[in-house]
Image: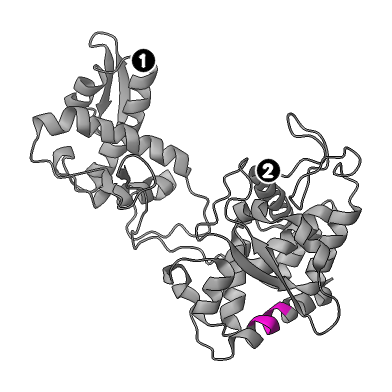
Amino acid sequence: MSEGFTYQKSEKYNGYIVYDNTLEPIIETLDYTSTLDTWNSKKNAVIALTLWFEFLEQKRLDFQDAETEHIPEFRTWLKTPPEYRRRQNIKIMHKEPHITNETWMQYQSRVSKFYEQYVYPKFPNCNITFKKSVPYSPYDNSETFIFKSNVKIVSPLTKAIPVDTILKIIACCTNERDKLLIEFFYKSGIRRGELFNIDKEQFKHVPRGPSHPAFTMYIHDSFSPDEDKQTKTGGREVSISTSLAERISGYIDNTIDGRLTNKNEHHEIFTALKTVGKTKKGDPLKGGTIYNIFKKAAKKAGFPRYTIHDCRHSFVTNMFSKKVGIKDAMDQTGHKNTKTLFGYRSKSDNVTDEVLSMISELDTQFKVGK
């Protein structure tokens, strides 16, 4: 008996066919793949189908009896390392996902086409659907693939980064720009794309003195057209510590990384340190570059599972640990609803003082850590 499902090319029938774990052919897969145009598309389709049929076999289901609710379970099953897939009630926390979201979407698309082009016409009572309606969708079509998994057997990671951990990550940065960049995300809670919506000119007007513990910066709504910089909730104001704002102002005024030497004028805060490909020294940083800056430092510090977006989770955690109210937290982070914040929710009457207290304490902790 074979250990799992396999597939094989069939020149005779001009397609690929999936074999189950007893080496019996699943004829329906050949009927489908023989209708595809190229051998590459046939193979890509059958790879996804092999995994889908193996998943269904473990669920003791025939392909025409699968339900829509099994799609998120399939995603979880795929993200689980193969050696753990046959275990019950497994938890994959502390493990890297076995597939990326992009790969998962490709698999789902190929399985979806198998059902649309082959299964539905021959089995009209099949109830599975790989798409769901999206009301008020910004796109022309009103449907999208089902890709979010709510399967209970997977325990999500707590993604808040402790202060001592973020300090270790910052210490592994190779230049002052990267250190300031990560600290800025950690202390502001902004989304990565929103960085491109902050006009550097506003940092020319940072207030001075102890009577101004916080500086309020404005995040524009899609200020720049060159990146995917959706704020999701429109423009908003975000408070950071005045001392951090002063350091950002100093970086903008004094950096000799190309902004001044190449007279590369733009509104964004952080710039490229050297010319790489089409990105010239002094150009605005790309979103992918920011992601890689953090991942490289986090990996070097021994915390590879953290990403730059976890700084946002950390900021929310810090707010609620100081009993900042949900409404004020949403104003600061720009969330549309409370669902994202439910894991950290708390209540407070004296919100303004709590926000300032949190900002001040974060600054103190950073100074102590250094």
Nearer mark to the viewer, of 1 and 2: 2
Q: Residues within 10 Å of mark 2 (few under 14, many from 20)?
A: some
- Mark 1–mark 2 Cα distance, whole angstroms, equals 37 Å
Q: Is residue 18 above or below residue 262?
A: above
Q: Is residue 144 visible?
A: yes
Q: Is residue 34 magenta?
A: no
Identity of the residue drawn at 28% across and 18% down: 36
Q: In this view, which residue lies farthest toward the bottom? A: 349
Residue 203, given in percent of the width and then of the height, sits at 79, 62
- SS majority, magenta: helix
Q: Residues within 10 Å of mark 1 (few under 14, many from 20)?
A: some
Q: Earlier in the sequence, mark 1 or mark 2?
A: 1
At label 2, the amino acid type is Lys
Identity of the residue drawn at 84% across and 64% down: 247
Q: Which residue is mark 2?
A: 286
Q: Which residue is mark 1?
A: 39
Residue 361, given in percent of the width and then of the height, sits at 73, 81
Identity of the residue drawn at 91% across and 54% down: 254
What is the span of residues highlighted in magenta in the rendered image?
355-359
Q: Is residue 208 rendered to the left or right of residue 28?
A: right
Could you say whether the residue bearing mark 1 is in a helix, strand or loop? helix
Quarter holding the C terminus is: bottom right
Give the total of numbered labels.
Answer: 2
